[in-house]
Amino acid sequence: MSSQQIPEDNLPVVQETAQGAVERHDDPFADPGLPAHQPRIQDLDERAANRSERAVAFMFTLSMLATVGFIASYVIFPVDKIVYIWPFGHVSALNFSLGLTLGAALFFIGAGAVHWARTLMSDVEVAADRHPIEAPPEVKAQVLADFKAGAEESAIGRRKLIRNTMFGALALVPLSGVVLLRDLGPLPEKKLRTTLWAEGKQLINMNTMTPLRPEHITVGSLAFAMPEGLDPESHDFQTQMGKAALMIVRIEPDDIKDKRQRDWAHEGIVAFSKICTHVGCPISLYEQQTHHVLCPCHQSTFDLSDGARVIFGPAGHPLPQLRIGVNSEGNLEALGDFDEPVGAAFWERG
């Protein structure tokens, strides 16, 4: 490469001495140092600094309002409300409002912090040599001193409007996370404690969809029933059957060991919940000779001749029994609801 092709900045510097011309090469990696600090308008004009303070406080205030809007969206918009919003099209009003308000709350906190740092906090560059990981005492003292100096330069103590609105925004944003717990599902209220069974409701055969009569149930047979009036085509059919599903067996009255079970039966016909009390699996395996029913999920076994008590497996309590009788038409009917919650145990039932 000729000298004409070498960039001028990299050409050697020729220095004249008494002994003649001597070439001197400058260090290309020399530390150029920090550029001179250029003050900002906020550093020179207090009115400009006050305008920046109000702008930062305004953004923090918008964050607070957005957080309040996020929480209010849960109350205002139903889950199934669909609205048209250009250019998104038809969207869920609840989801759109939640995303918009939470995004705005987080954005304005970030924007306010950036504007605060760029206009009011100190922007003087400070160079420091690298030091070992384990800092000596004098370095620790210097760090604490720098932290105090930074806190003073941030003017957080003097700019109370920024400080208070920032604390307000940061305090309200976590409430969005608390409200998100609502997405775990609807509150159960007392729905787990009751079923559709009530006094006077007939037992409907699940196979024939006709009312069950005592003569339909023979000793050793197993039938499944649902409450009168429940439509298999309804949207909540599975939800209701998850609590109201019933299994009907007929046992010789002399073979029934539990007195209350005998009193709640009709001529040896007993009705128990079909839902296992372990994790809620449906029970359908019946052994005629022993009157035992077995849950196919985890092999919990219940004795239907002795109050459906647990004789094996992880289930924690017996199957609930439904008190039944016969109406004026000769059909089997319920004489009330279960006297305890059906299905798997839950902590509120204690």
Image: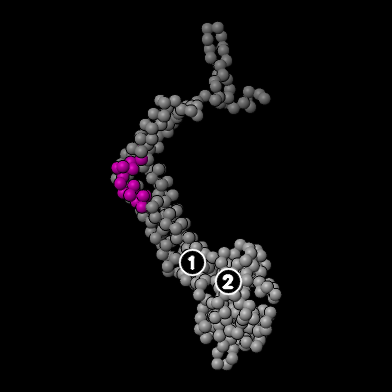
Q: Nearer the viewer, mark 2 or mark 1?
A: 2
Residue 132 position, x and y percent, is 50, 27
The quadrant of the picture occupied by the N terminus is top right
148 w.r.t. 232: above or below: above
User: Can you name the residue that lies furthest to the front here?
Assistant: 254
- Which residue is the site of mark 1? 349
* Type of amino acid at the residue the image marks with label 2: Leu
* Type of amino acid at the residue the image marks with label 1: Arg
Query: Callout 1: few (<14), some (14-19), or many (20+) C-alpha neighbours within 10 Å?
Result: few
Which label belongs to residue 319? 2
Q: Is residue 346 left or right of residue 207?
A: left
Q: Residue at x 30, y 46 (%)?
A: 160
Start-end of magenta stretch:
153-168
Residue 308 position, x and y percent, is 60, 72
Q: Is residue 320 among the parts visible in the rendering?
A: yes
Quadrant of res 24 = top right
Q: 155 or 310: nearer the eye?
A: 310
